[in-house]
Image: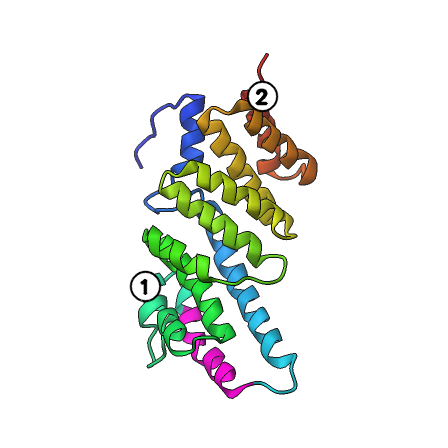
């Protein structure tokens, strides 16, 4: 493995904001498996709750959810293109679910999955298109909608738009791990733009609202606060 060059503090901020070894995402890889596997499970739980919490389940929705499982399986294997278009076994991918079962909960969830698949394969505009169509619920998925849109706009170098979306993500629901992750990204973007006051504010909020002294992430926040303190 090649040894990386030494970087100054400003470059380190850019690296944390933008560098994902060969993957076209904004600091997404560090959290990739947690998000992909946990959110796949959450999506299944939401779908199950939606179907079975009602005494009468419409046949079209039940059929759509049943058709979705093979695409979810490929998604969990990081086979994003297969999950989108051809998961195997004669089943529809997420794009097929969206086209063939419009108006169902399965089609809505497939828009979320499709957006993540497109983000992971570097197709940023398509990711934005599907994530904007996705209608989230509960305390977790709204955070992810705005946060992933923030990742997309960061990839497009539209940092002002990304900052706006990360702010929405932090305040969109109630999940400390995800809120802390997007709050840190917000601070790093401010840091990259040279907005020391806002960067410091974001990092100080992180330290106060999401305390976890056993977390390396939390302990590193002091470094970012110090870097953005004007003496």
Q: Main secondary structure of the magenta part?
A: helix
Range of the magenta residues?
58-73
Sequence order check, earlier mark of 1 and 2: 1
Name the residue beneath numbered marker 1: 81
Above or below, 31 against 137 in this view is above
Residue 76 appears in the rendering: no
x then y, percent, for residue 92:
36, 76
Question: From the image, which quarter does the N terminus lie in?
Answer: top left
* Of the pair 138 and 91, the residue shown nearer to us: 138
Given residues 84 and 195, the one toward you in this image is: 195
Quadrant occupied by the C terminus:
top right
Q: Magenta span has 150?
A: no
Q: Is residue 110 visible?
A: yes
What's the image's color scheme? rainbow
Determine the residue located farthest toward the top in the rendered image: 231
Q: Is residue 121 left or right of residue 105?
A: left
Residue 226 is labelled as 2
Instruction: Tell me: 105 left or right of 177.
Output: left
Structural crowding at the residue carrying mark 1, measured as other residues with C-alpha within 10 Å and reported as few (<14), some (14–19) or many (≥20): some
Is 143 on the left or on the right of 115, as rendered? right
Q: Residue at x 54, y 33 (%)?
A: 187
Q: Position of residue 158 (x, y in %)?
A: 39, 39
In percent of width and height, residue 7 lies at 39, 23
Q: Looking at this view, is 216 or 178 the one in front?
A: 178
In percent of the image, x 37 and y 74: which residue is there? 99
**68, above or below 84, in the image:** below
Estimate the x, y position of residue 184 in percent, counting from the top left: 55, 37
Mark 1 element type? helix
Among the 4 quarters of the image, the one containing residue 116: bottom left
Secondary structure of the residue carrying tag 2 is helix
Residue at coordinates 45% horizontally, 61% vertically from top-left? 133
Label 1 to label 2: alpha-carbon separation: 43 Å
């Amino acid at each position: 493995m090649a040894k990386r060059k030494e970087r100054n503090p400003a470059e380190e901020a850019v690296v944390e904001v933008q560098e994902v070894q060969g993957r076209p995402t904004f600091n997404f890889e560090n959290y990739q498996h947690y998000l992909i596997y946990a959110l796949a499970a959450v999506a299944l739980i939401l779908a199950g709750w939606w179907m079975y919490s009602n005494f009468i389940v419409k046949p079209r929705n039940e059929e759509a959810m049943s058709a979705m499982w093979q695409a979810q399986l490929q998604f969990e294997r990081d086979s994003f293109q297969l999950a989108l278009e051809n998961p195997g076994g004669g089943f529809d991918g997420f794009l097929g679910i969206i086209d063939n079962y419009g108006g169902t909960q399965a089609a809505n969830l497939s828009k979320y999955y499709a957006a993540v698949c497109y983000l992971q394969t570097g197709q940023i505009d398509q990711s934005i298109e599907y994530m904007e169509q996705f209608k989230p619920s509960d305390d977790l998925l709204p955070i992810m909608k705005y946060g992933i849109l923030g990742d997309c706009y960061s990839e497009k170098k539209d940092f002002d738009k990304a900052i706006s979306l990360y702010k929405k993500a932090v305040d969109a629901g109630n999940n400390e791990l995800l809120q802390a992750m997007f709050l840190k990204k917000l601070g790093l973007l401010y840091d990259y733009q040279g907005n020391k006051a806002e960067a410091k504010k974001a990092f100080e909020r992180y330290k106060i609202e999401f305390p976890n002294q056993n977390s390396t992430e939390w302990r590193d926040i002091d470094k970012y606060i110090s870097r953005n303190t004007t003496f």
